[in-house]
Amino acid sequence: MTKTPINTSLPRNPSVRLADKLNSTFIGKLTAKRSYKDGEQDKFVYEFEKISGDAPTTQLKDGAYREVQVDAGETVNLFGTTILNRAIDQVKIGAVLEIKYTGTGKKRLQMYDVAVIE
């Protein structure tokens, strides 16, 4: 038998930062769903192929997160929140989603409008 290590680290793609800009929108094709542990909590990160949108994107460079330009067709990460996790859990890999950040709701939850584009 041959032992082959499995890469369990999160991809270093640019991250979509919808909550940084009120009413920002992101449209992308869902390509992967991943989970990871943050202490005792399960967290989720979603990988998308960007189609369009005006949401800011950042990437870790030289020890700091900096805003970067991401073109259509490039891969980006979107870190889950309670609302996003509930919505994205209902769709399959390959779905095209439009996600709009609508502000902060009750109990300081970040609120989003999420729709499948067919």
Image (cartoon, rainbow, N blue to C red):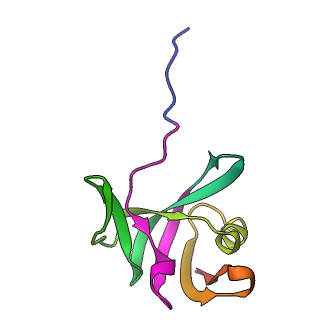
Q: Residue at x 38, y 56 (%)?
A: 13
Q: Residue at x 27, y 72 (%)?
A: 69
60 vs 28, left or right, is left
Magenta span covers which residues? 8-32
Q: Quadrant of the C terminus?
A: bottom right
Query: Residue 27, image x and y in percent?
Result: 48, 78
Query: Residue 84, image x and y in percent?
Result: 65, 72
Nearer to us in this view, 105 or 89: 105
Q: Residue at x 62, y 83 (%)?
A: 112
Query: Residue 31, image x and y in percent?
Result: 52, 59
Q: Residue at x 68, y 81 (%)?
A: 108
Q: How many marks?
A: 0
For residue 74: magenta? no
- Identify the image quadrant of residue 98: bottom right
Q: Quadrant of the N terminus?
A: top right
Image height check: is 57 above or below 34? below
Q: Residue furthest top?
A: 1
115 vs 70, left or right, is right
Nearer to us in this view, 62 or 113: 62
28 vs 111, left or right, is left
Query: Residue 45, image x and y in percent?
Result: 56, 58
